[in-house]
Each structure stands twice: as structure tokens, then as C-alpha cells.
Image (cartoon, coloured by chain):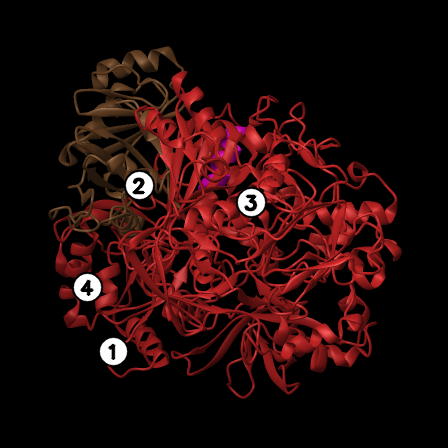
Amino acid sequence: MSKPVSALGGVKSAGYVNVQECAPFGMVTLRAKLSDKTIAANLKDVLGCPLPNVRKMSSGTYGRVAWMSPDELLCLSEYSKAYQLREQIKKGFQEHHVVAEVVSDARTIFRIEGARAGEVLTKLAPVDVERLAADEMRRTRLAQVPAAFWRIEDGFELMCFRSVSGYVFDLLKTAASPCGQVF
Amino acid sequence: MSVRLASGGRLIDRSQPRWFTFNGKRLKGYQGDTLAAALLANGQTLVGRSFKYHRPRGIVTAGPEEPNALVNLGQGDRHEPNQRATTTELFDGLTARSQNHWPSLAWDIGAINAQLSQLLPAGFYYKTFIHPRVAWKHLFEPIIRQSAGLGRAPDAAARDPDRYEHFYAFCDVLVIGGGIAGLEAAISAGKQGQRVILLEQSAHWGGRAPVDGGPDPAPLVAELRAMENVTLRLRTQGAGVYDHGYVLAYERVGDHMPDAPGPRHRLWRIRAGQVIVATGAVERPLSFVGNDVPGVMLASAVRDYVVNYGVSPADRTVIVTNNDDAYRTALTLLDAGLSVPAIIDARMQPKGAFYEAAVARGIPVKAGYAIAAVQGRGQVKGVELCMQAGQGNGVLETVACEAVAMSGGWSPAVHLWSHCGGKLIWDEAQALFRPDLTRAPTNQNGAPFVQCVGWAAGEIGQDNILPTWIMPQGAGPASRAKMWLDFQNDVKVSDVDLAAREGFESVEHTKRYTTLGMATDQGKLSNVNGLAVLSQALDRPIPEVGTTTFRPPYTPISLGVIAGEARTDLFQPIRQTPMHEWHAAHGAEWEPVGQWRRPYCYKKDGESTKDAVHREVRATRGSLGLLDASTLGKLLVSGPDAGKFLDMLYTNRMSTLKPGKCRYGLTCSENGFLIDDGVVARLDDQTFLCHTTTGGADHIHAWMEDWLQCEWWTWNVYVVNLTEQYSQIAVVGPKARSLLEKIGGMDVSASALPFMTWQEGRLGGYDVRAYRISFSGELSYEIAVPAAEALAFWELLIDAGREFDITPYGTEALHIMRAEKGFIMIGDETDGTVIPQDLGLDWAISKKKADYLGKRAQARAYMQDPDRWKLVGFETLDGSVLPDGIYAVEEGKNENGQAKTIGRVTSTYYSPTLDRGIAMGLLRHGPQRMGEVVDFVKTDQSVVQARVVSAVFYDPGGEKQNV
């Protein structure tokens, strides 16, 4: 196995908000019937966190676990731990109909940092960023492609599909380019 | 002549001169001027020509309702036609040219149309351009095209250099209009802690208040600025109100400083809980003879120019009115030291404070009078007076003047109220349509979500108005033909009269027949006057005639702002595989496949596209080719019911597939038509990996979810789309195994990894899954690697493959090789009307399964018809390549006298392997006609003959792929 490379090699741009492609995250898609109480209980044992509420994230042993839909979670981890995480889930849910698959390479994460990071996102996504909770992951669209984002200390992390990384980076760079401040 | 006054002008800064050009002439204005104000300040009262008769046109208004002062603004890449001078803020270096005249503004040849006006009445187009038929194409259309449009279109080569963007905003209360009513509404909502956005289309707060003696807006604005929950925005027009509290607003960020960095326009896409419309009102013109002569202006606009910009429209201005409000203009003009020779008031007994003030200051008020005609052609020279009650025969008096300030009363700007279904009522006392506040637009809960305040709500207080639709009221036909309703489109009172006489009763039909209100100003000045004239002609009350429909946007918004960021590189997302840059660096010529870009071929220096494709085919068949197949869909289907589910999704049986094996499958729609195909690999007892076509990946994923969520929701199956997690690289050709053995790792021998099987293992140090499948007919491995390692693995293969002359190949070589093998391609052999049986794929359709999607449809009599066209191969007798899509015909004609078609070509290529043209196609009774020769007719009617053969041209026994 060679060193994994992100789609754009860690590209960055400095506008009135800074945009940077992050090093790859580990990601495992977990599909299960989340309304099943035994699934929720098992989740605590396997991932060390409670079942996240609708549109929310909780924090577990490997990292954050995000609610994606009534039958899907996204488990984040270090890149190198993704396969281990998948095996742990498979082992922990042997009794259940659960599917866990590594999707780390299918995604790209960007970090959008600066006081006006939310403003830049609001040029591209129909989201009331002002009212986005600290533990919320918002699945939405960025201009013409699907995306999801959540708050970090000084801005946001945004996830999109790998194949459109170039498009998404250019979108963010354009929206954040100098003198584009709305307020 | 209009001129700059020595003092005054609350919006201009006289220490900041701004130089601009109009029709090439260099002129001076000041910071804070609009282009219209600066033109008037320079004595430029003639600013354009009307659409139909090329009549001289001057500035009528001081706002967005302006119908006349439209200019070609800017040059080169920044040239834009039809820009309103009244809303264009002046900047240094602004260039404007007037529109719709030749050779010059002052002397225009098109003005001859005015002499022919009797030949160009309402409905002229509909009556004239009908016969003779041939004249349409060669005479009428070229002439209409030549004369259509006011401004000059930008050059075809021009490219907009500016940037545009969208901005999503959310609020509890959106207030549109920054006059006093809007400011107060915003303060009230802000004090309740609501999240408020307040928009004002101009560059200044306060609306008409500073000109008309209303309250000072500054303290209100200061109070709002201190509220954290309130957002204030100037130069931002509420352009349209839509369902569910959705509002579009148009911010002109950089129009007034064109060379500044940053976006030029911004489209605000607002979700508002409540919308408060505080858009004020629009003053109506009066209809008298010559009311379109430059120098005739709205009374409110006249005082706007004096107060806001320190510009005098004329030394002597006659006021003509039917209400009190215009008296303000008279007093303002006197205050500025200008002359008001007379106030012509259509009312018999004007009274009230304004009237008394005017009389006290010595202005002659002509009560009960009307303007019989305006003197002057290119500029007002005076007015002839008559009695309003009469017919206008015999001029009673002539008053010399250079401007006429007219006021027919005010109409609330109800556009935004009406966009989403707010209803109007006719207010008899004030002679205006105002919002019926009991019938507001409703939101998703059925509750009202738009309110109106201030003048927009009809609270204008013009009860003392005398409704005056034409002047004088009894004017005859000759006069009515010189009274303009729509200044831009040249619609006169006589045109509406004619429409009524010809049977047009609906105001919507009359609008389209006469073009009243169809110009770029969308009838802001002409709407109410026009429908009032129509109501008189029809002898029906005004509310019964009603208004035309108000549609967004309020004024035209730029096309650039609608597109936002979606232009050039961001026009649409381009999907790229991890090897994209490598392909680009190695001569890839791109082919769009869905939103992906795939290499069509890789061109070497000096090589033609065709030569590159043929080289790639020969190299792959001869030794070793490499294909980036990452774009293929990869859908993981897993769960206890996965086998059962796939038995329904595919026409053949997938549940019997053993882990470790691969099987080709077909997917059909409920109507039996073939929609996708691909290889399914069984990963374990409960898990399958389904490969789809590149373009079908998202669709088939959604298709699977649809069936699982909506129909078979008790089945325990989950689908995960892994298309982007894995890249897939096809290693193809006689040397494929040699290459994989060279890089080393898992056993890829025929016995360890036979045809149509797969295995996980390591190759060249990478964790891979290798599938022994072939779309080319050669020995072939498709290797899946995680996308993050794909480029490195690809490069490893390229390096290691040099000794085998490894050749990356593109989609066209792929197509040729699959066609040589007779493999079908979704989208070539299928077009939404083709079932698998048409393609001879009966072997891939289970006869034993109780059901699968499409089974019942395929049993319909039409699908079972032996006359359906079926797949065969074609070889031209002369070896040439058949044109794509060409039809095969038989003797005779059908009932419509057309050739009888019996088939068509679906794929056709030059085969470098066989050195001749090969084709696949659908032919009636095709499989029974092997060896027969059929005729294909080209578009030039020449005939190409081809022999019907098997669609498998190359290695029919399949020995090459199964080694």
C-alpha cells in the first residue's frame, strides 16, 4: 500500500476566508435500522457513543458519528483506522442486519476557516448557517453538487464526493475571493 | 433647457466632479448624480427614440419606472443595452449612447414611421405579415429583425468580465422598501426581537420623505443600525416574491464602481417568515396631446431633480394635474428661484393648503382647464390650453414654457404584493388599485405572509383627485391618436380604442394586441391609464376590467446574477477520476460521459484522433492495453434478502451465483425496456457488488433505493454506493497476465483466477480486488484499488508494462473492441424502446423465475411480435463504414409515400483489427436473414449495400478472453 493521496494534494487558497483540502479522513458508512433499540444500545458498546439525534453528531472512541438518514450513520476516524473500525462494527453487530463499508476514499474534506467562513458557505448552500448547532452536520448542496458541513473551532469542515473535489474547491475559492464580503 | 442650479442638491457632492460621455460628448456631473440627473444638468433633454415611431424621447421620471431614458451603457465587454439612466449612478469614465436611431439622435431616418402612423396601428403585425406566405421568410422577418429591439446587442465575441454570486439569507421579517414606512416597520419588528432584513433599491434611505417634507430618516436608520438582529441593505431591490416566503432580491454591488474588485451583482435568495411591502407608489402621467414630447415629466420627478440633484428641468415649468400633490412641485420650483407660469388643474374647484399656498405665492391656477396640445417637437416650447370638460376645439390660451410637470395621481406599487397572489381592490375615492388586505398571499400553512404598509397599502390620501384618463375628456379621434399611454412602445389612447372596437374585451388580450405595458418598463406608468381608457371604451367599470398580471422581477435583473457563479469553469461540475491529471498530461482528448470526462483517446505528438484510436486498438489486441474504468458504477447490495432482491432487479438469476464468481446481468424498467447492464460479483453469502454503466450509476442506485424503500420495505437489504471509493483499472490484452505476474503478488493464472471469477489479494504491493472479466474479448483483468492509491497503482502498471508496449486506451478504442465482439452498449443498442429479446440476449433472461422487473411487460403482445427489429451485424459489400443511425429500406412506399424502413444501424466503426467497416443494428426478422443483402439509404439518397451477418465479428468462439 502506498501513501494515500487526497484528490487535490492538499490544495489551499487564501481569500477573505481560507480554504484548504484536508488530509484524508477515515470514514465508514453504517447502515442499520436506527429505530431498533438494540442497535442503539449496541452502538454505545461498539463505538462508545450514543445514537446521534436527527442531523446531529456524537463523539465516540474512533471519532465523531453523524446521523445521515433514518437508516444510515457516518463514522469518522483517523484514515488508517477505517478498516479496523469497519471490522469492529461488523463484529459488534453480528446479530443484526447491519452493513458497514469503508468510504474514506470516496470523499474529500475541506476546511473553511476565518471569521466569515459561514458567509462564504451561505453563498453556495441554502443553509441558515447562523442557526447551525455546534454538534450538527448539515447535508445540503453546494451549488450543483451534494455536500455536508459542520462547525469546527474557527470555521467549518465540508465534505463532498471525491470526483467533484476540483469543482468544490473552485467554488469555495471563488466565493471567498478578496473583496467579496457581503457584510 | 435644463441646467444645473447654482446651489442645492442634497445627494450630490459638488467638490467631486465626475466626467462621463454621452454619444461621444464629454460631460461633467457630480458624485451622487444619476446619469439622468447629470444629462439634465448638461441640457441634454433629448435622450432617445421610441420603439415604433422613433419619436424623440426625454427623461420622464427619476426612478426605476422610467420608460424613456434607456441607454447603451459601457463599451466592449461591459456594453449593456437598455440601462435606465434614472437608476444608473454616475461614475468617472461612464460612457453612454442613446438608442434606436440612425444616423443620429437628433436626426433620425426611422422617424418617418411617425408619418406613417396611420398605417401602423395596434395589431399591425398580426394584420400585415400574413400574406403572401413566402414573404415571411424573405421580406417580413428580415425587416422585423432589423428593426426589433431598442438597444444594441453586445458583440458576439464580448465576454462579461465581471463576477456574480448568490447569497442565501433567512429572516423572520423581510421589509422591502427603505422609505419612512419601511424603516418604521423594520424598527417595530426589530424591537420585538425578530430577525429582520430591510432592503432599499436606491442608494439612499427615506424614500420620498426628504423631498416631500416628511420625517428625517436619519434617526430611524441610526436606531436600526444599533439593532444586532436587523440587516440593512441599500442598492438591493426586492425583485420577486414566491411561494413559501421565498423572495429574490437583486443587489447592485459594483455598478457604481465598475473597476472595483468583488462581485458586480448579488442575488439574495431569501426565506422570510413575513414579507412587508413598503414599496411606495408610482405617479401616473396624464394623457394629453403631445404628452411624450421631451420636457414633459412627472411632477414628482421634477422636484426630485431640483431637491436631490440641484438640477432645473427648465426655467419655466407648467404644472398640469388632477390632484393636490403636484402643487408641491410648483412650490419647490419657486423655492429654487424658477418660474411656474401656470398650474393647469383639471378640477373645477381645487382647494386645500397646497392650493392656497400656490395662490398666495402668485401662481396662476387654471381650474377646470386642460392641455389641448403641447407645442414643440424635440423639446417643449409651450402648451395650448382648453377646458377639461370640452373637446379641445379652439385654443383658449397659450402658455410659453420649456417643461411640463404632470401628475395624474399616484398608484401604489403593488407588484410584490401581487406576485404571489395578493388581490387588489379599486379604491373609488382615491382612483387607484390598492391591496385588498383581506386577501393576502398565503404561505404553506394557509396563513397570510405578505403585508403592505404606507403608500404601497394605498394610504396615499388623494381623496381630492378628479379621475382624469384623457385630457380634455371629450377629445376626438385625431387628438386621441397623439396621446401616449406607453411611451416606450408607442401605444396611444387611439390604439386601445381600436382594440376595444375590434372586440378585445380582456385587458390581457388588449395588452398583447396593442403591446401596452409590454416594454422593458412593464407598464409601470401606462398600466392604470391604459385600463381606464379600455374601461371607458368598453363602458365597463374599471374594477371589472381589472389589471394585467404582475410578474417578477420588478425591474429587469442581469442574466449574470441569475447564473451566479455558474459560468466558465464553474458552469457545471466536471467529475474527475484519480487519474484525470495523468490522462491530461498524456494527450487525452476528452469525451463527456455523464458528468465525467473520460479520455476518448490519448494522442501522441502529431497524431490524428483517428490514428490514435486505431493504434490503441491494435496495441491492445496485439499486446497490452490499459483502461481507466473507474467511472463504472459500483453498488454494494447486502443483506439476508440481497439475492432475492437482485433476482427481481436483473432478468437472470443472481441468487444462484457462487461467492467468488461474476455474472453479466441486465436491468429493465417496469415496462420491460433495457435500462442498464453490468457484471455482478458475489462477495459473500449475503453481499453482491453490482457494476453499472458510467451514466447509470446514480440512476440505478436511486432505482434500487426506490424499490427497497417504497415497495419491498420489509426486505432486509442495504445498498451502499461505492463508485467513488474504488478506482477500477482494466489490464487488457494477450500480455495482461504477464504484466500482473511481473509486478507480483496474488496468483493470477488461469487455474487460480479463471474467466468470470474474482479474488482479493495483493498486486505490486497494493491491496486489490481482481475481476477476470472482459469487455474487449481479450484476456482481461479489471483491478479495483482504493481511489487514494489508484494513481500510484496506475503509474506502477505503466512503468512495469513498458516491455509489453503498454498502451493506455480511451473510450473510442473500448467501443470499437466491444463492437468487434458484438457486445451491446447501453445508449447505442438501446434507446428506451428496446427490450433484451430484441438484442438476442434471451440467454440472459431467466425463464424459470416467477418474476423480475420488466417480465410482465415483456410478455405483452407487442413485445412478443415476431416483426420486432432484432440485432444483427452488417458488413458493407464495399468494406466502407456505414453512417451512424442510417436506415435500411425495402422496395415500395408506405401509405405516406415514404420509403419503407426495415431497420437501422446502432453502432458502426472502422475495425482496425479486420480492416473494414463493421456495424451492429436492428433489422426486421434480422436473425432469419443471415447472408441476405439489405439496402441502406444515405441522406443524399445514395444506397449502400450491406450483408446481414452475426454481430460477433471477432473471435466468435471466445478463445482469446478465456485463456
What secondary structure is marked by label 3?
helix
Which SS type dominates the magenta stretch? helix
Identify residue type, mark 2. Answer: Val
**Quadrant location of residue B178?**
top left
Q: Which chain carries label 4?
A: B
Q: Where is residue B350 in the image (x, y as percent from the top left)?
A: 71, 37
Q: Same subunit under labels 3 and 4?
A: yes
**Quadrant location of residue A43?**
top left
Q: Dot 1, crowdedness within 10 Å: few (<14), some or many (≥20)? A: few
Looking at marks 3 and 1 on the same chain, the residue that comes earlier in the sequence is marked by 3
Q: Same subunit under labels 2 and 1?
A: no
Q: Mark 2 lies on which chain?
A: A
Q: Same subunit under labels 4 and 1?
A: yes
The residue mark sitting in front, 3 or 4, is 3
Q: Same subunit under labels 4 and 2?
A: no
A87 relative to B429 in the view: left or right: left
Residue in the image at 17% along x and 50% along y: A11
> What distance separates the C-alpha of mark 4 from that of mark 1?
26 Å
B784 relative to B283 in the view: left or right: left
Identify residue type, mark 4. Answer: Ser
Q: Position of residue B343 (x, y in %)?
A: 65, 47
